[in-house]
Image: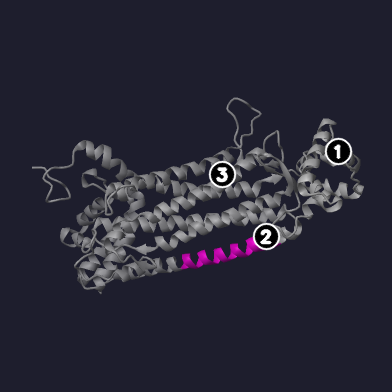
């Protein structure tokens, strides 16, 4: 009689459709990523079982040799069988095939797939978070360098995509650097809640074996042990949190890409990207499509989809292990996180290779009345008007200039005086030199001091702060990575020694 390949309780094998349509796709998709995580956890678990004398020296050594052999063989050496349900049972079957069930079957003492998979998810999330943080730090560095390089390039600033006030391209880039700085903090903060070990929690209520959870946590580089076994296996909230933080970061990139996209159009022509980041049309030979920017704009939607899927899947599930609580909601998580990491790498290339077009940018800033606010401010200071009066008067001045075909830099004291007589019923005579300064975007930019504006004074302070915090964040991540690398090195060294001799 054919029975289950993994259970003495189940007297029927899995239905062929269940195998082919439900289990096989997941097994084939996930096994290559799962194998190194299973291996890493098995190494820590076997070392702990030996330390606690739950395994004999001979049993531990045989397991260690077989685990290292399977690691060296790699995922292609496994004959994956959906009849064995999942990655772990396929791994265990290969282990038993090598060294027999008496030894191979002992690797799962004091453990469940529930805490195994919970541990795998935390390790995988930790790795993804560190990779993301490194990519973000690289992008922040590039933004800082470009903001420093182009802090004097005058360009129009926009609100509602209409000319607003003159700024600089460096100032514009520094804004994204500040946004990504906050995004980074949200993501790196997730590490604190992610790097907690569930191993030893068992199926949901711990184990009767005298295991040492602190030992396996230390071997795997975790900062702490989850105190509640059921919570350890039920919780994936750290993944939802991470997806939320990455969604926000990807949204910042998407908004940057949207600004760049508009600036590179023929109609704006204030920014240039080289051919190395462009694609072309299959029909129209003149096309230089900003495909990299389109990919950056789309990235936020991809991560958001994974986030919504995760949160929606968790809703109304039991607070314990279940596929609908701990597996299926996160179907898209790992692709989304890796995709976000790759997107940050693409964004860094775009930032490093973008070149503002200064002549076009300042010409627009001079022509599009973005200095109108400074005319109103001048009227408040020099003519004693209330700001609302000045605002109303300058609005009429701009309308009159537009009607006459004048640009902003052609507004003079006479035009202001004429409109003041009409609008306010009184004459206002401003010094011509002050009016000329108020409509010059290069001079206007430098008046924005001590308010977080684009002046050289404020920009140098902001750039210094960005650089200092970037260095602090880089140092913190390096120290975190060093600790994890040291834990991994110690695990490999100790486990290798176990495989070489009985201890």
**Circle 2 SS class:** helix
Q: Which residues are magenta?
A: 461-482
In the depicted view, which residue is nearer to us: 489 or 355?
A: 355
**Circle 1 SS class:** helix
Residue annotated with mark 1: 419
Q: Inspect the magenta stretch and tell me whether residue 443 lies in it.
A: no
In the depicted view, which residue is nearer to us: 128 or 190?
A: 190
Label 3 CA crowd tier, 10 Å (few <14, some 14–19, many 20+): many
Q: Is residue 455 left or right of residue 121?
A: right
As drawn, the label of residue 254 is: 3
Label 2 CA crowd tier, 10 Å (few <14, some 14–19, many 20+): many
Instruction: Tell me which residue sits at (40%, 63%) in the image.
Output: 195
Instruction: Tell me which residue sits at (26%, 46%) in the image.
Output: 79
In the depicted view, which residue is nearer to us: 442 or 356?
A: 442
Residue 139: percent from left, percent from top: 58, 53
Q: Quadrant of residue 277?
A: top right
Q: Answer with mark 1 or mark 3, whichever residue precedes in sequence.
A: 3
Residue 273: percent from left, percent from top: 66, 42
Q: Quadrant of residue 220?
A: bottom left
Instruction: Count every numbered label the image shows and give the total.
Output: 3
Q: CA distance from mark 1 to mark 3?
A: 43 Å
Residue 33: percent from left, percent from top: 36, 51
Residue annotated with mark 2: 463
Q: Is residue 371 visible?
A: no
Residue 357: percent from left, percent from top: 74, 43
In the depicted view, which residue is nearer to us: 36 or 292?
A: 292
């Amino acid at each position: 009689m054919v029975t289950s390949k993994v259970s003495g309780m189940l007297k029927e094998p899995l239905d062929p459709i269940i195998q082919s349509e439900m289990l096989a796709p997941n097994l084939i998709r996930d096994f290559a990523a799962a194998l190194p995580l299973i291996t890493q956890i098995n190494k820590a678990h076997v070392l702990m079982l030996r330390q606690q004398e739950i395994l004999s020296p001979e049993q531990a050594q045989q397991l260690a040799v077989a685990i290292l052999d399977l690691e060296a063989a790699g995922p292609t050496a496994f004959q994956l069988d959906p009849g064995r349900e999942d990655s772990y049972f396929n791994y265990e079957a290969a282990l038993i095939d090598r060294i027999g069930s008496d030894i191979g079957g002992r690797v799962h003492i004091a453990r469940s797939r529930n805490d195994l998979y919970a541990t795998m998810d935390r390790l995988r999330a930790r790795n993804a978070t560190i990779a993301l943080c490194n990519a973000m730090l690289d992008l922040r560095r590039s933004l800082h360098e470009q903001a420093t390089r182009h802090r004097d390039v005058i360009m129009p600033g926009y609100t509602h995509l209409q000319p607003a006030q003159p700024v600089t391209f460096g100032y514009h880039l520094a804004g994204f650097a500040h946004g990504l700085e906050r995004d980074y903090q949200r993501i790196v903060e997730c590490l604190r809640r992610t790097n907690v070990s569930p191993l030893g929690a068992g199926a949901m209520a711990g184990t009767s074996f005298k295991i040492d959870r602190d030992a396996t946590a230390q071997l795997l580089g975790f900062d702490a042990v989850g105190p509640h076994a059921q919570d350890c296996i039920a919780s994936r909230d750290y993944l939802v949190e991470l997806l939320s933080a990455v969604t926000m970061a990807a949204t910042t990139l998407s908004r940057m890409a949207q600004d760049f996209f508009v600036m590179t159009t023929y109609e704006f022509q204030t920014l240039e990207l080289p051919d190395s980041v462009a694609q072309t049309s299959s029909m129209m030979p003149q096309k230089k499509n900003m495909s990299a920017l389109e990919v950056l704009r789309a990235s936020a939607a991809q991560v958001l989809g994974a986030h919504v899927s995760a949160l929606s899947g968790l809703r109304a599930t039991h607070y314990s292990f279940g596929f609908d609580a701990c597996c299926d909601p996160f179907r898209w998580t790992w692709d989304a996180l890796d995709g976000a990491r790759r997107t940050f790498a693409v964004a860094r290339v775009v930032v490093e290779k973008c070149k503002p077009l200064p002549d076009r940018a300042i010409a627009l800033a001079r022509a599009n009345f973005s200095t109108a606010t400074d005319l109103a401010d001048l009227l408040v200071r020099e003519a004693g008007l209330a700001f609302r009066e000045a605002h109303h008067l300058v609005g009429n001045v701009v309308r009159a200039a537009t009607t006459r075909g004048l640009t902003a830099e052609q507004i003079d004291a006479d035009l202001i005086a004429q409109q003041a007589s009409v609008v306010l019923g009184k004459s206002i005579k401003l010094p011509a030199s002050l009016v000329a300064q108020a409509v010059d975007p290069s001079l206007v930019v430098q008046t924005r001091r001590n308010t977080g504006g684009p002046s050289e004074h404020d920009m140098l302070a902001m750039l210094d702060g960005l650089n200092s915090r970037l260095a602090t964040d880089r140092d913190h991540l390096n120290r975190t990575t060093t600790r994890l690398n040291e834990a991994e090195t110690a695990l490999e060294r100790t486990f290798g020694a176990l495989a070489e001799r009985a201890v």
